[in-house]
Image (tube, rainbow, N blue to C red):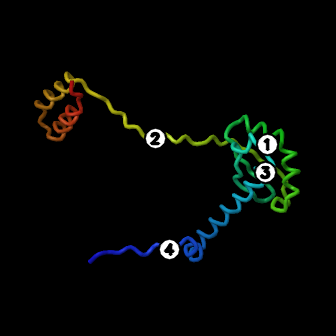
Amino acid sequence: MSLRPPAAKSPTALLREHKPLQALFSAAQRLDRLQTLVQAQLEPAAREHCQVASWHDGCLLLLTSNGHWATRLHYQQRRLQRALLALPEFAGLQKIQVKVRPPSPQVAYQANRVELSGAAAESLHSAAEGIADPRLRAALERLARNARRD
């Protein structure tokens, strides 16, 4: 008896069937559209450092990568608000809030690999021979096997 996974569904079928997924997708599309509109009003250098986080209750929340860009956006806030008020998507815009959110570093995992000298491995081997506990003895022998071969 084999268990067969169900057939894969198309993205449109998934969106039709699952209302929470549909709501999430439409919210993401809305934010993407707002991001495009905001970027069109920003100076070219600021575009990559500014991201629309939310837009509700007359408040537009923008995230910046650092304090420098937050300050620059703060100085341009009135001009940006006037420009966005002219767009129907931002009707009712009362304030623009800017917060700093540094990009999260994508650090690749690197195992800390310690290399033992031959003398250290020999010392671990001799220590393991005098240990009665089999688990501790096996652990010391595993450590000894990690020695570099000169």
Q: Nearer the viewer, mark 2 or mark 3?
A: 3
| Residue 78 on image: x %, y % | 87, 45
**Local SS, label 3:** helix
Q: Are marks 1 and 4 in contact (CB under 8 Å)?
A: no
Q: Nearer the viewer, mark 2 or mark 1?
A: 1
* Quarter of the figure that contains the N terminus: bottom left
**Local SS, label 2:** loop
| Residue 72 on image: x %, y % | 78, 37
Q: Residues within 10 Å of mark 3 (few under 14, many from 20)?
A: few
Residue located 36% across and 34% down the image: 112
Residue located 52% across and 42% down the image: 106
- Classify residue 61 as left or right of residue 147: right
Which residue position is annotated with label 4? 9
Which residue position is annotated with label 1? 43
Quick check: 130 above or below 46? above
- Classify residue 98 as left or right of residue 8: right
Q: Tell me which label, 2 or 1, sits earlier in the chain.
A: 1
Residue 127 or residue 122, whichever sits in front: 122
Q: Are marks 2 and 1 in contact (CB under 8 Å)?
A: no
Residue located 13% across and 33% down the image: 131
Which residue position is annotated with label 2? 108
Q: Type of residue at label 3? A: Ala
Quick check: 105 above or below 10? above
| Residue 90 on image: x %, y % | 82, 59
Residue 44 or residue 114, whichever sits in front: 44
